[in-house]
Image: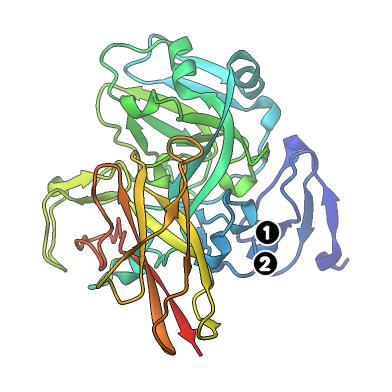
């Protein structure tokens, strides 16, 4: 039998994602995945991604977009970045999937079937910005360890689910609750069943926000497997690692959650500024919460060529963690002067905002850089250069820039 042409049809209860083996997903429709076996998995077919995406790592899979691919106002699956810490779950049995609530600060342990969550609680839909805490890591010097993300580890999809706070209210939480931590079915790279690949969380105040969802749909369809099918926590505006995929348990804690990737230097930055390359003790690192203000030029693609006298339209997105973006500007002279852009209000809180401008004042022929700078509702703007160095290369919100040649 020629394995390259072998196709089977799976049911919801027999889905398999043998990442790193010889199975590739041909689509992400949960009503009937087709599995195409081949010797060398193609990540673009495996995850239904555009071939313009960049693969940074294969075990675990980590893939990012380039800036111009993120031009859609709502990010489609084919352009959404992948950030994994472990291996994608195998043999998902959605019919028997349960989400259990436990921990020191629940009134009683309680479990919900997926269908029960969907039917018992009101459903909401929000556009929510998710950005990897290490987006932009490639610019740090001295270099920081980890995937060398450029600018494409960000997205703003439309997520549908139930509010975590509604479910917590039904479970019953104690007055001493301060944090929640998620647990999931992805496997540790070592395949040691005693180890979790990642188990992060957020303060109870974040868990109780209106926009914090237990999501089961992305852009109106069941969440693609690699993005957390069948159930994902979405905590927009914070590092995307707080939005756990494939979750099957949430612990309500009376202390800061201490799961995998919550301690040490993971998703933490120095509490006080440090010199580049300086060693920082674990006890002097603070957990990243709201992401900083940032923007991205998505049109035109860097390297654009225009004729002298032509008008160049530009557009992109801006976001500011828990805050909103109040102003947006561009510069043609390396930050010596700035011109205002039009910036739209967010679709809802924690959604990114869209900006645009028309540039017709290139003074002469030659090479130019277009820089973009957002300022948040607290008056903080993006730095033009890399902000403070940190050991893990987090929170780079320096101005994005593209190259343009006028001929």
Residue 283 circle label: none
Classify mark 1: helix, strand or loop.
helix
**In the rendering, at what x and y percent does residue 41 appear?**
67, 65
Viewer-proximal residue among 21 and 154:
154
Q: Who's the residue at 51% across and 34% down the image? A: 247
Residue 58 visible (yes or no): no
Q: Does residue 230 lie above or below 59 as drawn? A: above
Q: Who's the residue at 37% across and 46% down the image? A: 239
**In the rendering, at what x and y percent does residue 341 appear?**
41, 58
How far apart marks 2 and 1 lie (CA) works out to 6 Å
- Indicate left or right for 365 with 385 as reference: right
Viewer-proximal residue among 386 and 309:
309
State the residue position of label 2: 42
Viewer-proximal residue among 12 and 393:
393
Q: Quadrant of the N terminus?
A: bottom right
Classify mark 2: helix, strand or loop.
loop
Q: Residues within 10 Å of mark 2 (few under 14, many from 20)?
A: some
Confirm or deny contact between disc 2 and disc 1 (CB under 8 A).
yes
Viewer-proximal residue among 68 and 40:
68
State the residue position of label 1: 46
**In the rendering, at what x and y percent does residue 322 appear?**
34, 38
In this picture the colour scheme is rainbow
- Indicate left or right for 387 with 211 as reference: left
Which quadrant of the view contains residue 363? bottom left
Residue 357 visible (yes or no): yes
- Please identify the residue farthest to the right as the structure is shown: 1
- Indicate left or right for 383 with 207 as reference: left
- Indicate left or right for 275 with 18 as reference: left
**In the rendering, at what x and y percent does residue 200 appear?**
37, 39
Numbered-mark total:
2
Q: Residues within 10 Å of mark 1 (few under 14, many from 20)?
A: some
């Amino acid at each position: 039998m020629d394995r390259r042409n072998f196709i089977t049809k799976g049911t919801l209860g027999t889905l398999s994602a043998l990442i790193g083996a010889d199975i590739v997903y041909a689509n992400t429709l949960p009503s009937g995945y087709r599995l195409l076996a081949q010797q060398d998995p193609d990540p673009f077919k495996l995850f239904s991604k555009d071939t313009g995406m960049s693969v940074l790592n294969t075990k675990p899979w980590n893939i990012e977009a380039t800036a111009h691919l993120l031009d859609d106002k709502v990010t489609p699956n084919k352009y959404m970045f992948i950030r994994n810490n472990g291996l994608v779950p195998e043999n998902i049995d959605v019919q028997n999937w349960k989400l259990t609530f436990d921990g020191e600060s629940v009134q009683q342990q309680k479990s919900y079937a997926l269908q029960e969550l969907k039917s018992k609680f009101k459903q909401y839909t929000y556009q929510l910005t998710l950005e990897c805490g290490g987006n932009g890591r490639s610019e740090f010097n001295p270099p920081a360890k980890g995937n060398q993300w450029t600018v494409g580890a960000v997205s703003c999809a439309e997520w549908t689910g139930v509010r975590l706070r509604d479910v917590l209210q039904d479970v019953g939480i104690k007055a001493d609750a301060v944090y929640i931590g998620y647990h999931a079915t992805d496997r540790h790279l070592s395949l040691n069943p005693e180890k979790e690949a990642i188990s992060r969380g957020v303060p109870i105040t974040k868990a109780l926000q209106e926009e914090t969802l237990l999501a089961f749909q992305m852009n109106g369809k069941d969440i693609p497997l690699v993005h957390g099918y069948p159930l994902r926590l979405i905590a927009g505006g914070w590092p995307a690692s707080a939005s756990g995929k494939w979750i099957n348990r949430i612990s309500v804690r009376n202390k800061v959650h201490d799961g995998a990737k919550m301690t040490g230097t993971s998703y933490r930055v120095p509490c006080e500024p440090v010199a580049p390359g300086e060693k920082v003790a674990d006890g002097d690192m603070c957990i990243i919460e709201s992401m900083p203000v940032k923007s991205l030029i998505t049109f035109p693609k860097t390297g654009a060529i225009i004729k002298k006298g032509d008008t160049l339209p530009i557009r992109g997105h801006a976001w500011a963690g828990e805050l909103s973006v109040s102003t947006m500007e561009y510069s043609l002279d390396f930050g010596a002067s700035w011109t205002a852009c039009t910036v739209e209000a967010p679709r809802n809180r924690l959604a990114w905002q869209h900006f645009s401008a028309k540039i017709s004042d290139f003074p002469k022929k030659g090479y130019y850089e277009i820089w973009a700078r957002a300022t948040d509702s607290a008056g903080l703007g993006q730095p033009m250069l890399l902000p403070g160095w940190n050991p893990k290369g987090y929170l780079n919100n320096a101005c994005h820039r593209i190259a343009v040649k006028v001929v």
